[in-house]
Image: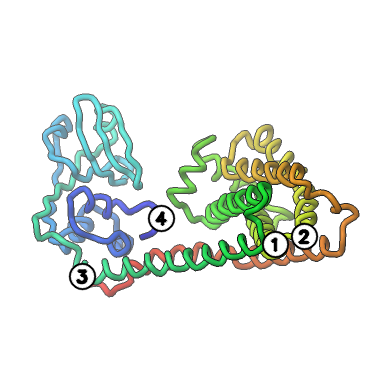
Amino acid sequence: MSSSPASLFSDWLQDLGVRHTCGYSDRQYARMPFRTLFGLSKLLQSYGVDARGYAIADKGEIAELKPPFVAQTQTGDMVIVERVGPDSVSYTTQGKREQARLDDFTDAWTGIVLLAEAGPQACEPGYRRHRFLEIMTRLRDAGVWIALAAVFGYMFVAHGLEGRWYTVALTLLDTAGLALSFMLVQKTAGVHTRMSDTVCGVLQEGGCDKILATDASTFLGIFHWSEVGLAYFGVSLLTLLLYPDRIHDLALINACCLPYTVWSITYQRFVAHHWCTLCVGVQATLWLLFFCYLFGGSFSGAWPPHISFFALGAVYVAALLVLSKYSNLIKYLHDDNDSDTGSAETD
C-alpha cells in the first residue's frame, strides 16, 4: 500500500466496511473520466454497493441523513460526511479528518448527496487476487529493507563503530539527516506522503512547500538543496561505515557546511518569512554532527587536509550530479509503486 493519502473512494469503502485494497480502488477512482457523483455511484455498483444520489431542498434535513455519505460542495469537491451533530459536521476530505460548524458546512454544501448501503456480499472485484498482490508487494519491499539493514549492521559491527559513543551518534545523525533529506527530495519531486506532510507541519503548516517553491531552494539554479543534503548524508554514512579511519575528513567537510546552515535559517526567518521544518531539521542535524566530531576528537589530524579529503569531496560532487540527473525518478518510482498493488486487469 502506498504511503500517500488514500482516495475519497477508498476512504468511503473503509467507512462502509467493504473489503477492498487501496491500491486497486485508488487506481479505479483515478481512472474515472469525470469526478462526479454519478461516476462514483457507478463505480460503487461494481463493488456490489447500492448507491443513490439525492438533491436535498431543505439543507436543514442533513441531520436526518445516515452517515457516512458523500456531499458535494459549491466548489465541485466531494467530501465524506462522517457525523452530523447539533452544531458541527465531521467530514473527510483528501484523506484528512476535518470539522466545521453546521451552518458553515450547509452554506458550502450544494444540497446534493450520494447515499450508499453495503450488503454483506459487497466486495472489490477480484479482491483475493488483488489482496495477494498487495501482500507480495509489501513482502518484496520489506525484503529490500531487511537486506539493507543486515548489511548496515554487519559493517557497523565489523568496523567497531558500536564501541565509541560518538561514532554511534554520528551513524544515527547521518541516518536521520538522510531520512529528512529524502523527504525533501520527495517534496521537490511533487511526491507527498503522510510522513513528510506531518513532519512539515510541525513548525508551520505548508512552510516546506512555500520554501521549496522559491528560487533559494536551488544551488546555481540547477541543484536543489534537498539533493545536496541527500548526497551529503548518504556519502557521509557510507564513508563512516566503510572507511571509519577517514573520520577526520568527514569532520572537516562537515565544518565547511556550517556557513550554509546560518544562511538557510536567516533566509527563512527574514526573507521568506516561512519555516520549512525539514530544512530546519537538516540544519540542526549538521550542527549536532559538528559537536559529535568536535567532542569525539575527530578534528585531530584533519588540518592540513590530506589528499583523501579532496578525493572524498569528489565523491560528494559525483553523488550530487547523479542525484540531480535522476532525482525525478523518485516520482516515477512512487507512482509505479502505487500502481503495483492495483495493476491487475480491470474486472
Q: Residue furthest top?
A: 87
Per the rendering, the mark at residue 3 is: 4
Q: Amino acid at mark 1?
A: Thr
Give the CA separation, mark 3 to mark 1: 48 Å
Sequence-wise first label, 3 or 4: 4
Residue drawn at the location 20% of the way across and 61% of the way down:
43
Give the CA separation, mark 2 to mark 1: 8 Å
Label 2 CA crowd tier, 10 Å (few <14, some 14–19, many 20+): some
Residue drawn at the location 17% of the way across and 47% of the way down:
114
Can the viewer see residue 140 in this picture? yes
Label 3 CA crowd tier, 10 Å (few <14, some 14–19, many 20+): some
- Disc 2 is placed on an element classified as helix
Q: Amino acid at mark 2?
A: Arg
- Disc 3 is placed on an element classified as loop
Give the CA separation, mark 3 to mark 4: 23 Å
Sequence-wise first label, 1 or 4: 4
Q: Residue furthest front?
A: 163
Residue of label 1: 239
The image quarter containing residue 236 is bottom right
Assess whether mark 1 and mark 2 are in contact (beta carbons under 8 angstroms): yes
Per the rendering, the mark at residue 126 is: 3
Give the CA separation, mark 3 to mark 2: 55 Å
Give the CA separation, mark 1 to mark 4: 30 Å
- Disc 1 is placed on an element classified as helix
| Relative image position of residue 41 (x, y in whole percent) | 18, 56
Depicted 216 relative to depicted 333: above or below: above
Q: Amino acid at mark 3?
A: Gly
Sequence-wise first label, 2 or 1: 1
Residue of label 2: 246
- Disc 4 is placed on an element classified as loop
